[in-house]
Amino acid sequence: MHTIEIQNFKAFGAKGVIFGPNKPDLTKRPKNILCYGDNGTGKSSVFEAILWAFFYDKIINDKVPKALIGEERDNAIKQLQLKYNNTETNVDFSLKINGEDYKTFDNSLYHVYMLKGDSLTVTSDISMLELYSKVRFGDADLASLILDENLSIIITEVNRILSDMFFESLQIEESQNENGLIILRDDARGISKDGELPLFFNEAKIHLVKLLLLLSSVELLAPQDDSSHRVLVLDDIFTSLDSSNRLFIFQYLAEHFRRFQIILLTHNVNFFNLAEHLINNHYKENDRWVMLSLYDATSEFKLYEKYQLSTKLL
């Protein structure tokens, strides 16, 4: 996905924004996107626009009762769509992917995985079914991931990452008390729990485990052939992580998801600066990334591309 044009959608009014590079080269691989925006500048609206553009059929099926047919169903769908319209312009929204209306855009080769930070809210336990219920991961049957050897593969990978990349003593395993329930184990402290986790473990570590479980699931789900377009969209997943783990999570994403287009949305300026530094100086991959900032200009949300002088407006 090189660009998504967003107009009259949620926070964005008639002028809208074109989210993506200022001058995309459609003949080349789409660039990764690192986007900073304070709360209330349209970041979540960008996430929702991408979500609607790629999953609108599933959103409609989830939110419109299947018992409705004919004109009743059409009216219910229309009412659902109206909720996404900008409240000031109050006209039908427009979304275009790579310049083409989302309804006619061929997304059959796109595998899009979307995760918001509020999906990682610390709870008393870690249930894989609950985690999967809060994300959009392509067309996969997520319930199948807790069956057979799939969950074992995910757990093994998370344990390896926790040890090798995050230098954590924490490990996980599947509980026998409930299908898909995760045990957190810290042998150094003699603790092994599948419930009341916040009483025994740092909330940032619980957050990290949830995040790694979901990202390892994406790795397992994603197609391996290069004819497919893999897109990973993450919105504010970094705030609850420890400062050191924000560094490690970016390194993990950069090294494990090289075959994906990565779209990172954040309101944490420290993480934005850290990621920008790693891109430019450690990985030296500034040609694969575009840095964007969303901002509020007198109640009109605009998009600024770093190192460019112009603001992209429709």
Image: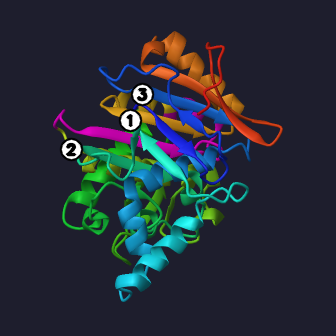
Closer to the camera, 175 or 278? 278
The mark closer to the camera, 1 or 2, is 1
Quadrant of the frame with the N terminus:
top left
Residue 112: which numbered mark, if any? none
Is residue 173 placed above or below 284 in the rendered structure? below
Instruction: Determine if residue 166 is in view.
Output: no
Badge 3 or badge 1: first in the primary sequence: 1
Write down the residue under mark 3: 254
Q: Are marks 2 and 3 in contact (CB under 8 Å)?
A: no
251 lies left or right of 25:
right
Q: Residues within 10 Å of mark 1 (few under 14, many from 20)?
A: some
Is residue 40 placed above or below 176 in the rendered structure? above
Q: Position of residue 117 (x, y in %)?
A: 57, 52
Instruction: Determine if residue 137 is in view.
Output: yes
Q: Position of residue 57 (x, y in %)?
A: 36, 64
Q: Confirm whether the magenta stretch covers residue 206.
A: no
Q: Please state which amino acid type lies under the numbered disc 3.
A: Ala
As measured in the structure, the alpha-carbon distance from the residue carrying label 3 to the one carrying label 1 is 18 Å
Q: Position of residue 298 (x, y in %)?
A: 83, 38
Residue positioned 71% across, 39% down in the render: 301
Write down the residue under mark 2: 223
Q: Please state which amino acid type lies under the numbered disc 2.
A: Pro
Element type where label 3 sits in the image: helix
Residue farthest along the right direction in this orientation: 298
Write down the residue under mark 1: 1
**Magenta residues, start to end:** 225-249
The mark closer to the camera, 2 or 3, is 2
Quadrant of the frame with the C terminus:
top right
Q: Residues within 10 Å of mark 2 (few under 14, many from 20)?
A: few
As measured in the structure, the alpha-carbon distance from the residue carrying label 2 to the one carrying label 3 is 18 Å
